Amino acid sequence: MTRLMVFTLVLITLTTYAQSAKTAGAFQYQLHTKTTMLNCDLFYNGSESVFVVHAPKFDTNTDTIKSNQEGSNRTIIRANINDGKDFALYKRYENDLMVSRELIVNGEKAIVNDSIPRLNWKLESQKQQIGLYNCQKATATFRCATYTVWFTTAIPLPIGPWKLGGLPGLIVEATNENIGLTYKLIRVTYPVAIDTKYPIEPPQTGEPIYSFAQFGEIQRKELKKMEIYLKSMAGNPSSARFQASLPECFDKQ
């Protein structure tokens, strides 16, 4: 009798979760870095999702170079990405497909075909209230970066910002500890009818299409070019250090 009751409870829980996963919703995030704040949207319809980072607006189409007083550390900021196209990441869950519009460090854009990552989350005991939601902490390492997230089972959807997901609830806040990048949930429209029409589709811009391995090779080459360029402009190139603040590395798949 006890086993039957336990089985029934598990069945009810799994059935409820499956029904929730078929519910649509819209979620707004803010992406915070040390120097910028960008608005993001996550749309989900039960089988697909798209995460959109709205492109920053610049007043110039030229590269800007800033240096500190010693002249040994210089930073290049690409300001020519404002072409009216946002950066989007599409997921189709039934076949683990992920397609994203990415920025190459030389200022060019590309469409990248990848698979939805399966992160090895470690559920922590810490809990806290974030806004309206009781949240639990989880951590994981993905492509060289350590992520600390807070998720809520009050919205039982295994989704989150960017490439993050796979937890038993919506990710409310996520931080890339390596570069100090944080996503914060600011608005929720959930649940809504599954037939609600959200703009969920892969990015289609006519730009070059690469696999993630090909994209990674291009990024590595462009990063090396940038390193050589920046070091050549330093007052003491032999002692200059180069560090790129990217959300993921490209030597680990």
Image (tube, rainbow, N blue to C red):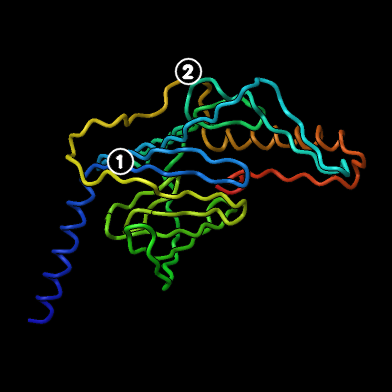
Q: Residue furthest top?
A: 206
Image coordinates for residue 18, horizontal then vertical, percent: 20, 53
Residue linked to disc 2:
206
Q: Residues within 10 Å of mark 2 (few under 14, many from 20)?
A: few
Instruction: Say how many tags the image has.
Output: 2
Residue 180 sits above or below residue 80 on the image = below
Q: In which quarter of the view is residue 69 placed?
A: top right
Q: Nearer the viewer, mark 1 or mark 2?
A: 1
Q: Amino acid at mark 1?
A: Ala
Q: Which residue is mark 1?
A: 26
Assign a secondary structure to mark 1: strand
Relative to 247, is 222 above or below? above
Q: Position of residue 68 (x, y in %)?
A: 82, 42
For the point 39% across and 51% down, which residue is it?
165
Direction from residue 204 to residue 43 in the image, left or right: left
- Decide: is 1 above or below 202: below
Where does the image place residue 106, in percent across and percent down from the top left? 67, 28
Viewer-nearest residue: 113 or 16: 16
Task: Say left or right for 77 vs 186.
Answer: right
Crowd rating for badge 1 (residues with CA inside 10 Å; few <14, some 14–19, many 20+):
some
Please tell me which residue lies in front, 17 or 77. 77
Disc 2 on helix, strand or loop? loop
Which residue shows up at 29% across the image and 42% down it? 94
Using the rendered view, name the quadrant where residue 43 is placed. top left
The x and y percentages for residue 171 are: 39, 54
Mark 2 is on which residue type?
A: Gly
